[in-house]
Amino acid sequence: MIHFYNTINRKLEIFTPLEDKKVKLYTCGPTVYNFAHIGNLRAYMFEDLLRRFLEFSGYDVHHVMNITDIDDKTIRRSMESGETLEIFTEKYTQAFFNDLDTLNIRRAHNYPRATEFITQMIDTIKVLIDKGFAYSSDDGSVFFKVSKFLAYGKLANINPDDMRVGSRVENDEYEKEEVRDFALWKGKKDGEGDIHWDSPWGRGRPGWHIECSVMSTHYLGSHFDIHCGGVDNIFPHHENEIAQSCAATGDAFVNYWLHNEHLLVDGQKMSKSENNFYTLRDLLDKGMSPEAIRYTLLITHYRQKLNFTFDKIKASQKAINRLRELNRRLNNISLESGEDISKMTNLMLQNFNDRLADDLNISGALGEVFIWVNKLFALIDKQKLSAESAQSGIKAFKKIDEILGVIELIDEPLSEDIDQLIVDRKQARADKNWALADEIRDKLDGLNIILEDTPQGTIWKKKT
């Protein structure tokens, strides 16, 4: 039985999908005006863990993630760059996909882009106006009337009557009736170039919130299972999504709302002014491996703040190396007799699953894995593990890695130079040219590659 913490009800709840063994999942995607930073990636990693666990548990998941390619930031930055909105946003959209692939994050089944759904957004806004939930202003904008939607504030646990202009309430600088009302359509304003579309209210563009409502329901229907995002999306974005979606369709919209906490760097909020702002490219340039970055972003419970440090990256690489070393040793066992580990392995896998079923308790799940890992290393060291038992351990590793995604993830093929150095050292050892072999080893060490000579041959590891 799976339990998730449902933000809208503020408690753990048994997960029951609308359709048996099928899950409809929507996750808030990137606004493509720059490279994703590691705080963004923490959210995508949590969502990857959620999806992987649901699929691990036998569910058929339909995953949709939006691409926000039209908003204030994309317009402003594209104009500053001198590029069209399409060319500008495509560059960062592809960079986002590259980041996902580098970190072994499973791609969503659909990536709708906001600019592809303008017509559907206009149609939804018309419905809201016809139902009395929205109104147009003299400047060609359309606003959602919050006072009309009586359930407003349930997700964020706020009283809409207490809302004032401030850090948590948008002031769109358009002619709305009440400060708490939010824009569905923004009339064309001077200084925004030609990035506008025709509508019944004049030329303009959609508001941010309506984009997600239209794109999610287009693929998943008016009522679906899970909606995810960071805690910063709870209000106003997700609160507004609920209001406009339920008002437009008359349906329940979403059953389970899951939100991940913020990421800190060395205990501080990430900020360029603090010189602690990192993209994935920044970390790779510093020599960190994708698998260590993935593991670091993964292993803190999603509802806890993640304190990102370089020491954690080193610890993650060390943990991954230990998992890979055990997997390698299991593959090289040839003993015909030994202890039966099937009971111990099955118990580990059951406990691993149970911890994840408890609101994605990944740290508890990993604790079960490493207890098992340590026991297997002890058996191998004492030569008490048979080849047959080793195979059950290898199969277990494959199951674990369906969730972790790091054991078989190689950051990138070794460069040709490094690969050639390893080949040259092997030849030097065969020629008994020990001085050259040692020289090559030192060169590789300088490149953060450690060699280990074993009876089965030379293996390499990344330095921790």
Image (cartoon, rainbow, N blue to C red):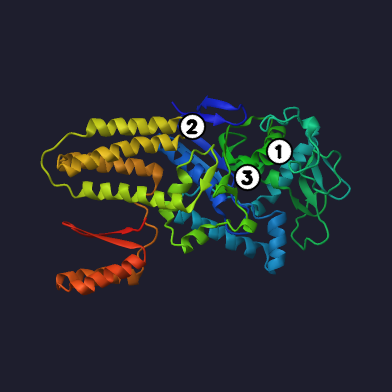
Furthest toward the right, the residue is 138
Residue shown at 18% from the left, 44% from the top: 381
Picture quarter with the N terminus: top left
Which label sits in the foreground, 1 or 3? 1
Q: Is residue 53 above or below residue 197?
A: above
> Which amino acid lies under the numbered mark 2 shown in the image of this protein?
Asp
Disc number placed over residue 215 in the picture, else none: 3
**Do the residues under discs 1 and 3 have CB atoms within 8 angstroms?**
no
Taking depth in this image into account, of 228 and 316 the one nearest to the observer is: 316
Measuring from the top left, give residue 392's x and y in whole percent: 23, 39
Q: Which residue is mark 1?
A: 240
Quarter of the view holding residue 451: bottom left
Q: Kindly state the secondary structure of the residue where label 3 is placed.
A: helix
Amino acid under label 1? Asn
Going from the N terminus, do you reach mark 1 or mark 2 first?
1
Residue 51: give x, y in percent of width and height: 47, 40
Residue depicted at x 66% and y 50%: 117
| Label 1 – label 2 distance at C-alpha | 26 Å
| Quadrant in the picture for the C terminus | bottom left
First in sequence: mark 3 vs mark 2 = 3
Instruction: Residue under label 2, please give it.
Output: 359
Q: Secondary structure at mark 2?
A: loop
**Is residue 26 toward the left or the right of residue 145 in the image?**
left
Residue 345 x, y percent position in the rendering: 27, 34
Q: Please, is residue 128 above or below residue 445 in the view? A: above
Query: Quick one: label 1 or label 3, which is nearer the N terminus?
Result: 3
Total numbered labels placed on residues in the image: 3
**Crowd around label 2: few <14 · some 14–19 · many ≥20 (10 Å):** many
